Amino acid sequence: MRTFSGKRLLVATHNRGKLEEIAELLKPYGIACVSAAEMGLPEPAETEDTFAGNARIKAHAAAKATGLPALADDSGIEVDGLGGAPGVYTADWAVTQTGRDFVQAMTRTWSELEAANAPYPRTARFRATMVLAWPDGHDEVFAGKVEGQVVWPMRGMQGHGYDPMFQPDGYDITFAEMDSAEKNRISHRADAFGKLVACFEGAKA
């Protein structure tokens, strides 16, 4: 496994919530994060049908454009009552003419579960795949997940995306009701990061 020895990492995202979550995870390693949005990079088309494939597209595009190592994450929610949808298309379900609207996406998700008369508990999982790519084309790939269920109505004001309707196993609150430090300890992204962390051991402050 190739290690990262720098103190500044490009995070290939335009999602502020995701950037803040990754920056918090990297803080113990003394690594400062800069986003693709801050660097003025365009968002590449995510044309793959897997989380790993789309994360690779974003990481390699950012690394090639800047000459810096880049970390990308592709994540989404799989709802068993919908055959695993929306999955890699989670963000697409939130697309509107004026930007992303996850309240709309969550409402659609629950409406489709109701239409399908899906049984309770309505089990689901968040998945995340992190790819750390270098300008020379090398990359390291790490996948994580957290199991739980989707609930209605939406609850909580923290987090982002589908957090207000996802209740992780072992909890009676949603991600959006959870303290960010607790969420970051158990999340799908934390699971993937726990495997990625070997790349940063040489950079730990």
Image: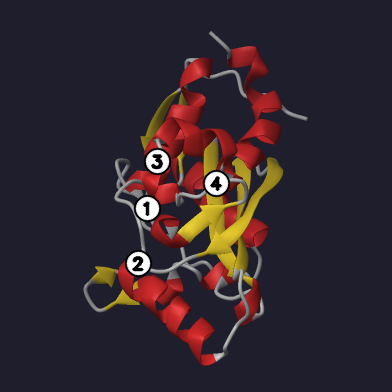
Task: Check contact, mark 1 vs mark 2: CB within 8 A.
Answer: yes
Return the residue at label 2: 102
Residue 157 position, x and y percent, is: 29, 50
Residue 158 position, x and y percent, is: 33, 46
Q: Mark 4 vs mark 1: which is more N-terminal?
A: 1
Q: Residue at x 69, y 48 (%)?
A: 143
Q: Which mark is residue 19?
A: 3
Total marks placed = 4
| Marks 4, 1: nearer the viewer | 4
Return the residue at label 1: 160
- Asked whether 33 or 182 is in front, the reply is 182
Is residue 61 visible from the viewing direction of this image? yes
Q: Mark 1 vs mark 2: which is more N-terminal?
A: 2
Is residue 10 visible from the viewing direction of this image? no
Q: Is residue 95 left or right of residue 147?
A: left
Q: Mark 2 vs mark 3: which is more N-terminal?
A: 3
Return the residue at label 4: 171
| Marks 3, 1: nearer the viewer | 1
Q: Residue at x 50, y 50 (%)?
A: 172
Q: Mark 3 vs mark 1: which is more N-terminal?
A: 3
Residue 174 position, x and y percent, is: 45, 52
Q: Which mark is residue 65?
A: none
> Marks 1/2: CA distance?
8 Å
> Marks 3/1: CA distance?
11 Å
- Under tag 4, what secondary structure? loop
Q: Is residue 27 above or below residue 153?
A: above
**Label 3 amino acid?**
Leu
User: Which image quarter: residue 124?
Assistant: bottom right
- Asked whether 28 or 180 is in front, the reply is 180
> Marks 2/3: CA distance?
17 Å
Q: Is residue 14 above or below residue 97?
A: above
